[in-house]
Image (spheres, grey):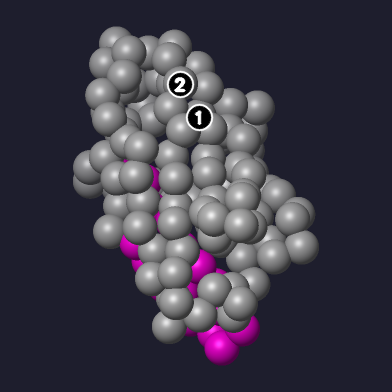
Amino acid sequence: QVQLVESGGGLVQAGGSLRLSCAASGSTSSINAIGWYRQAPGKQREWVAGISSGGSTNYADSVKGRLTISRDNAKNTVYVQIDNLKPEDTAVYYCGADTKWGGRSWGQGTQVTVSS
């Protein structure tokens, strides 16, 4: 099993930046990819960025250019830097790990609130 813990959320003014962290533990060698997702009030959870075990990165078109996903293998941690934050970025941000056994493990989420 894989356990994930997100951190780094908070209240920030529009135009500001945040770096969110996703710390993985457990069977981390089984992880194929980790993605960042977000869920705004009343909306479905959406994928925004992902990084594979090989280091390939992908971004949703809606956030491309403002998000940067990275990882620190020594710390088993994946980060997402969000720049030029907008009020519409307000959401609970989750990381999800896809493992070689199938299925997805989720963290508990971290709240990001952007004030205008």
Magenta span: predominant SS is strand
Counting from the top left corner in percent of width and height, residue 22 is at 44, 52
Residue drawn at point x = 36 percent, y = 27 percent: 88
- Visible residue check, residue 10: yes
Q: Which mark is residue 17?
A: 2
Counting from the top left corner in percent of width and height, residue 75 is at 54, 55
What kind of residue is marked 2? Ser
Q: Which residues are magenta?
A: 92-107
> Label 1 neighbourhood size at 10 Å, few (<14), some (14-19), many (20+)?
many
Residue annotated with mark 1:
82
Which of the 4 image quadrants contains residue 12? top left
Q: Is residue 22 above or below residue 17?
A: below
Which residue in the rendered view is the most extreme toward the bottom?
101
The question of residue 98 being in magenta is answered with yes
Tally the numbered discs. Answer: 2
Residue drawn at point x = 34 percent, y = 45 percent: 7
What kind of residue is marked 1? Ile
Residue drawn at point x = 59 percent, y = 80 percent: 30
Counting from the top left corner in percent of width and height, residue 79 is at 53, 44
Which of the 4 image quadrants contains residue 53? bottom right
Q: Name the secondary structure under disc 2.
A: loop
Asked if the residues shown at circle 2 and circle 1 are in contact, with their CB atoms under 8 angstroms apart, the answer is: yes
Query: Label 2, label 1: how many angstroms apart (C-alpha)?
Result: 5 Å
Please state which of residues 73 and 92 is positioned toward the viewer in this rendering: 73
The quadrant of the image that shows the C terminus is top left
Q: Name the secondary structure under disc 1.
A: strand
The question of residue 12 being in magenta is answered with no
Please state which of residues 12 and 64 is positioned toward the viewer in this rendering: 12
> In this image, 115 relative to 86: left or right?
left
